[in-house]
Image: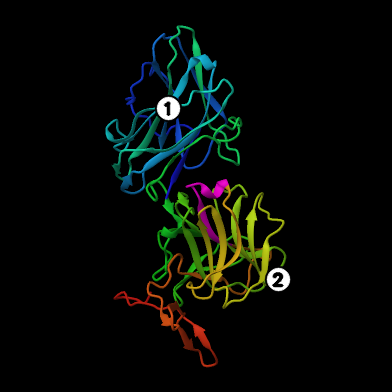
Amino acid sequence: MATRFWLTSSAAPYTPATKRGTWTDGTSTVTGLLGRQPAGASTTTAKAETSATTTNVLLGRWISAPARAAGTLSGTVSWVLGRLASATAAAMVVRIHAFVTVGDSDTVRGTLLTNYTGATTWPATAAGGTVTNQAVTSVAVQAGDRLVIEVGYQAQNASATSYTGTLYYGATGTTDLANGATTVTTDPGWVELSTGDGLFNAPTAEIVDKFSTGIGSRFVYWGGTFWNPTWKRAAVPANDQYPGLMATDVGYEIANSTHSFEVVNLPTGGTGTNFSAIVLGPADDGTFARTKYTLATGNLTFENCVGYFDATPTTLAFDPVAHRWWRFRETAGTFYWETSPNASTWTVRRSMATPQWLKFGTLRTNFEAYADTGSTTTPAEVDNVNSVLTTIPKVWTGSAWTQKPVKVWSGTAWVTKPVKTWSGTAWF
């Protein structure tokens, strides 16, 4: 899966002492965070050159957060950066050097791109400029390593006239900067590696908890949330303390991943504002995707919230059997809200083109509840976060094997039940 970074104007988390690219003028001290989401005000870094021969000028360095897992960066790199030449006669082209440090040190783990020099001259009107699918040298990354990108220009003019090259960074617009776009002060510039899935941020599918022996280290919880030892589930009541069960790490991403919960029971009672919900978003700013059960109406809604509100959610009457499992899924630029009776057969309830904020590698997720009355008669019972049947029963239809749920007789009806395995100490 591709891994996108943005040139932010936030402070660099660490700055290597040595500039590794070959720069005629490497005196720039500009550094910033190479972030997994856009951040900071739109800013520029500019520098003049006066050489009558080809010269390489560094404009700034961007450094990533530490890698969270070991793996290999390989394949290709693409980018769109906002840039400007003070005159077309400057004949400036982009120059980039990219490498990985050994943790927070000045030692190079490996070099991905060595003094890449572009072919398209910078315009005299600021605009985005792209390079696509540039091959990189593979680097075996270890947890804690950082990606560093040095960005500048090569001036290919043969004049002693002073020309200035300017690079735009920062900005948090709702659209990434596109090639040729003049929206360089609103749309953020970016760099994307064709690999790196899970190295700098984990897919949401990695948040796994079966709650077999308690609420594990994947989650923090508050507001009256507790572990139900009888059913071995997390219990989230609806009250005025905003009970919640939140994944501890905000560095997750949904791109080409999934995120599912088994919702065994839901609260009853409550008046006024009251709900139980699964939420996925980049920060506590009111922008998030949500699947919400409303106690007062018995409806399930699938929401794309901005400012904590969606005026046109998709709504249906909740069915505790058909809607036992709730899932978010993103693939190929489309985001889905889904439900399932068995974690095997999923029904799409709503979909949308994946907005920019759902492409970030800094998402957080939680199961939360609220009720104005302060209490309800039962809590939501949540189980099997991203944990589904490892072996799904199939039957032969005459032409193909088809997945079928396991059912048991309850005494009055056949009821879908999950398959469990004995760990040596408990069933899970």
At a point 31% along the width and 38% down the height, the residue shown is 137
Residue furthest to the front in view is 399
At a point 43% along the width and 54% down the height, the residue shown is 203
Out of 7 and 376, give the one closest to the viewer: 7
Horizontally, residue 361 falls left or right of residue 374, namely left
> From which residue to which does the magenta span run?
356-368
On residue 171, the disc is none
At a point 33% along the width and 77% down the height, the residue shown is 422
Q: Position of residue 224 (x, y in %)?
A: 54, 64
Would residue 25 be seen by someone viewing this image from the given angle?
A: yes
Q: Position of residue 178 (x, y in %)?
A: 55, 36
At a point 50% along the width and 89% down the height, the residue shown is 410
On residue 118, the disc is 1
Q: Give the amino acid type for the residue marked by disc 2 in the picture.
A: Thr
According to the picture, the residue beneath numbered tag 2 turns out to be 297
Colour scheme of the rendered structure: rainbow
Whether residue 357 appears in magenta in the rendering, the answer is yes
How many other residues sit within 10 Å of disc 1, few (<14), some (14-19) or many (≥20)? Answer: some
Residue furthest to the bottom in view is 411
Q: Is residue 59 above or below residue 371?
A: above
Out of 105 and 361, give the one closest to the viewer: 361
Q: Secondary structure at mark 2?
A: loop
Q: Is residue 237 above or below residue 320?
A: above
Q: CA distance from mark 2 to mark 1?
A: 59 Å
Q: Give the amino acid type for the residue marked by disc 1 in the picture.
A: Gly
Horizontally, residue 88 falls left or right of residue 13, namely right
Q: Secondary structure at mark 1?
A: loop
Quadrant of the drawing holding the C terminus? bottom left
